[in-house]
Image (cartoon, grey):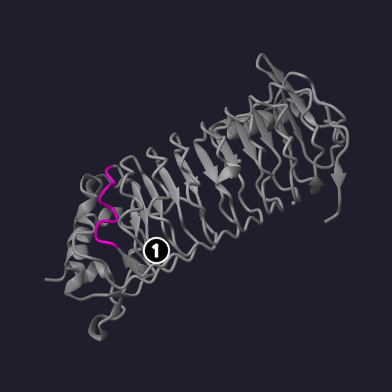
Amino acid sequence: MEKREAAMSSWSLERKQSPVGWDSHLSRILFLLLLFVVSAQGVTPNPDACLVSHSGNGSSISCQPPARLPHYFPADTVYLAVEFFNLTQLPANTLQGIPNLQELHLSSNQLEDLSAKFLLPVPQLKVLDLTRNALTRLPPGLFQVSAALHTLVLKENQLKVLEASWLHSLKALRHLDLSGNQLQTLPPGLLASFTDLLILDLGNNQLQTLRPDLLSGPLRLERLHLEGNRLQELGKGLLAHQPKLRYLFLNDNRLATVAAGAFRGLQKLDMLDLSNNLLTTVPEGLWMSLGKAAGNMKDGFDLSGNPWICDRKLDDLFEWLVANEDKMFFRNDTRCAGPKALKGQMLLVVARSP
């Protein structure tokens, strides 16, 4: 079973390069289709020009090297992608004259900062993708007119700290991706106003602890990524009010302790990844508290890569494993580290033993 595996007056160019949802994927697919149609008609695209398509909703523009960036964009532009140019700065008036813009993709540049006025001309913006840049902070007031923004991707930047005030205007946010940064802590109230948030990605940072009330604002989460951090403990309060959570990724941390009631509030979990942690045992009742989800975890679970001590304290886990073995990933890598007599044996084999 395999696991699962986003008017141009002047630009500053220097020689110094996530999925954002279905809308973004669809837009990029349409661009590829357009290229195919153009090629099929025997027309050679101009390598110095950005790719432009028009529809009843407005113009869509995609610019990648070796194309030359235009000095202005059509007034009806609704989709704009400027990627892989190694831009370090953008003028504050870059988006002036395209008030209907709904998607902006600036990934794989080297943007170091943004003007607080950068988004003022585009109040209808719904998707902002800043993946793989060099941002260390966000200017206060950047999102002051961004009430429509539902997807914000800041993946793989250089953020070491966050201030809750930077994001407070984003009342409609449904997808927030902060993965691949250098965050060690999160400020109080960071997510307090995100009542509609569905996807939160904090993976691959340097987080050691999480505030119990971190998720007290977003009560409709469906997907939570915490993998690749330095978390040592999962407390009982963090997930207490997440009845709609379906995917939970806690793999590749340093988890040694999971509280007895940590999963008690989860009612619809489809996938759980606890692989590659430091778990030796878990409290009695942890798995049964998943309740109905234990029978409906259709996308599976992974407990591999932990130093399990296979004694009577795992009886509860053994019973749960046998009942759900068809949903278990990497059975061969889920083994006992002790006691000595059982070291190296597969957890599932020990669980089936009388």
Residue 64: percent from left, percent from top: 78, 40
> Mark 1 = which residue?
275
Q: Is residue 117 left or right of residue 342?
A: right
Residue at 20% in and 58% down: 320
Q: Amino acid at mark 1?
A: Ser
Q: Is residue 43 left or right of residue 290?
A: right
Can you say whether 266 is above or below 80 in the image?
A: below
Residue 138: percent from left, percent from top: 67, 46
Q: Quadrant of residue 321?
A: bottom left
Q: What residue span does the magenta drawing correspond to? A: 259-267
Q: Residue furthest bottom?
A: 340
Most frequent secondary structure within the magenta stretch: loop
Task: Assess whether residue 172 is covered by the magenta stretch.
Answer: no
| Mark 1 Cα-neighbour bin, 10 Å: few <14, some 14–19, many ≥20 | many
Residue 161: percent from left, percent from top: 60, 56
Q: Is residue 307 left or right of residue 121?
A: left
Q: Quadrant of residue 51?
A: top right
Residue at 51% in and 39% down: 175
Can you say whether 233 is above or below 173 in the image?
A: below
Can you say whether 94 is above or below 132 in the image?
A: above
In-front residue for pair 298/308: 308
